[in-house]
């Protein structure tokens, strides 16, 4: 069983920065793809950023050039650096870990709230 714990959310002014962290337990972290999703009230969950086991990255168009996803396999942790934050970035941010080992697996964290407001 894998547990994901997100941290780093909070209230920030427009134009500010936050760094989210997602710490994973277990031994499968380094072979897994990790995604950050977000969901605002009344909206569907949106894929924000992805980092593969080989550290390839991908971003939603809405965050390209502002957000950076990275991973530290020695710490079983993925980071989402968010710069130039906008009010429309306000959402709950969720870490998702998935992969394949003797079958497909997928785990979710509990989420961390990001609020961008003046």
Image (cartoon, rainbow, N blue to C red):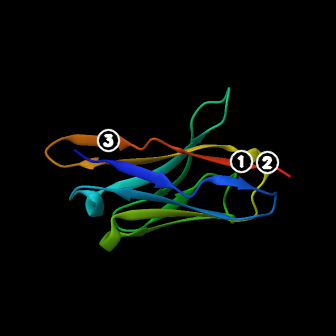
Count of numbered circles in the view: 3
How dense is the environment of label 3, judged by Cα within 10 Å: few (below 14), some, or many (20 and up)?
Answer: few
Residue 97 coordinates in the image, percent (x, y)? 36, 49
User: Viewer-nearest of labels 1 and 3?
Assistant: 1
Left or right of 100 on screen, residue 53: right
Which residue is tagged 2? 87
3D distance between C-alphas at marks 1 and 3: 27 Å
| Dot label at residue 106 | 3
> x and y percent of residue 17 in the render?
70, 65
Q: Quadrant of residue 65?
A: bottom right
Q: Which residue is mark 1?
A: 115
Measured from the top left, where is residue 39 in percent x and y?
60, 37
Q: Nearer the viewer, mark 2 or mark 1?
A: 1
Q: Residue furthest left?
A: 102
Q: Considering the numbered disc 2 on the image, is that residue within a helix, a strand or a loop?
A: helix
Q: How far apart are the two marked residues, 2 and 1, measured between alpha carbons?
A: 7 Å
Q: Earlier in the sequence, mark 3 or mark 2?
A: 2
What's the distance in space between the residues labelled 3 and 2, CA to CA?
Answer: 30 Å
- Residue at image x 39%, y 60%? 52
Q: Tell me the element at label 1.
A: strand
């Amino acid at each position: 069983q894998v547990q994901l714990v997100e941290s780093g959310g909070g209230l920030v002014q427009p134009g500010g920065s936050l760094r989210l962290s997602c710490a994973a337990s277990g031994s499968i972290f380094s072979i897994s793809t990790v995604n950050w999703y977000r969901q605002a009230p009344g909206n569907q969950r949106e894929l924000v950023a992805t980092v593969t086991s080989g550290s390839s990255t991908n971003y939603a168009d809405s965050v390209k050039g502002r957000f950076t996803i990275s991973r530290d396999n020695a710490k079983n942790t993925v980071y989402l650096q968010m710069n130039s934050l906008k009010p429309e970035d306000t959402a709950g941010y969720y870490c998702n870990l998935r992969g394949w080992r003797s079958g497909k697996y997928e785990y979710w964290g509990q989420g961390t709230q990001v609020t961008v407001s003046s």
